[in-house]
Image: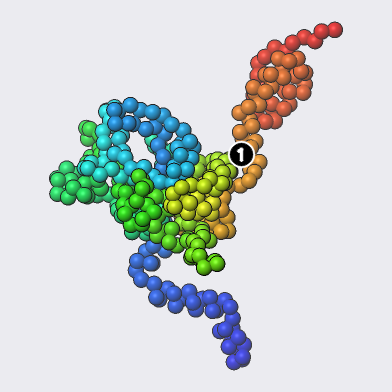
Amino acid sequence: MSKMSAFCRLKSPSSKRLESKVSRANRMSDWERIREARSDLTDYVIHLTRNFVIDDAGQTTHENGMARLKQILKCGYLKPSGARRITYQGNSTWTIRGKHKAVCFTEQPLEQIPITLSKCSAYTGYGIALNKVDLFRYGGRPVIYGDKECFYRLSEDDEYLWVQYRPIHSGEDGYPNDFTFEREWRSRVFNNQMSMLQNLVGLPILLPDDLKRVRVRAVRNGKVLYRIRLNPLFRVIVRRDTEAIRISEFIKKLGTISPESTYLKYYYRALQKAQIISLEEVERKIEDGKWEYCHIECLPSPKEKRILAPKFNFCTFTRRLRAYVPGVVLLFASLGHSARVTKPFVARFAGGAWPACRRRKRRL
């Protein structure tokens, strides 16, 4: 090999990429190497809505997850509560102790959310995802799993972070108190950081650090103006692909509202640029081997793809159509249509489920 060819190979784009990768690997700390190697770590926490609400009187009200998400998006904040929960014995108890109410989050990666929802009926597939660093700087913290002695050692301002932990061995009597799989975070409402947040009664979806990041200062005709030019870090999560389109249309309608609050004015503008994630699309992409859909921070950026859901999925459409085909065929058969027309249609779309119905005789 000549000196020129060796020099060209050394300075080729592939060798440059390899050199930069090696130099970056040498500069990486142990913390960065661990985060890059492990798939159970994430930069986001997710607040999932429940399919029921228990008030202070202990009355249970069932609510639709999509409707609750629309309420959250319209008001612009997450309301703190005592997180009342039904126990295994059928009793209701407050899971957040102390004098402060809080908003709860889970630190599970995005790929684990559909798995948890399939095993736990208390939560729905609708929620808000916040950046973990922004929430920590706002005041959010991981919970403290421990026994009652641990709770008594906490100060009054930190009692809301305590979660009872009482594990048992397999085969022992009793029911364990073990919710460590939730990897829970909690946050009180700290709205004294910015003047525009002081009248807000909940945790803002557009956190102060996120607001400072997306708001750009501009001067026009001697006046200082602030505009939302960047995509926010928070995400909107829905269960199905069709609901992602519906929630996008709902968000567009919110953009036409002229709110009186300064925070809501900036929030509604940022919401127009926020990414909407369909868990149905996430499951589909992971099954296809696209592992970047396992974590929110690895997804296509909101600027590249704002709605993570297909506009039209023929497979999903056909699967849902099959549920309605037998009823349609019954209607056609009752109206006197020939079975020679309807029976092949059922055999194709309903898997051969021909309904046992009597065809009316035609009048001569």
59 over 306 or under it: above or below: above
Where's residue 75, x and y in %? 44, 43
Whether residue 287 can be seen here: no
Q: Secondary structure at mark 1?
A: helix
Amino acid on which disc 1 is placed: Thr
**Image check: 340 left or right of 128?**
right
Front-lying residue, 177 or 8: 177
The residue that appears at 61% across and 39% down in the rendered structure is 316
295 over 122 or under it: above or below: below
Q: Which residue is mark 1?
A: 316
The residue that appears at 52% across and 68% down in the rendered structure is 222
Whether residue 205 can be seen here: yes
Residue found farthest to the top: 364
Query: On the rendered image, what quadrant is the C terminus found in?
Result: top right
The residue that appears at 48% across and 47% down in the rendered structure is 259
Front-lying residue, 170 or 210: 210
Where's residue 204, x and y in %? 39, 50
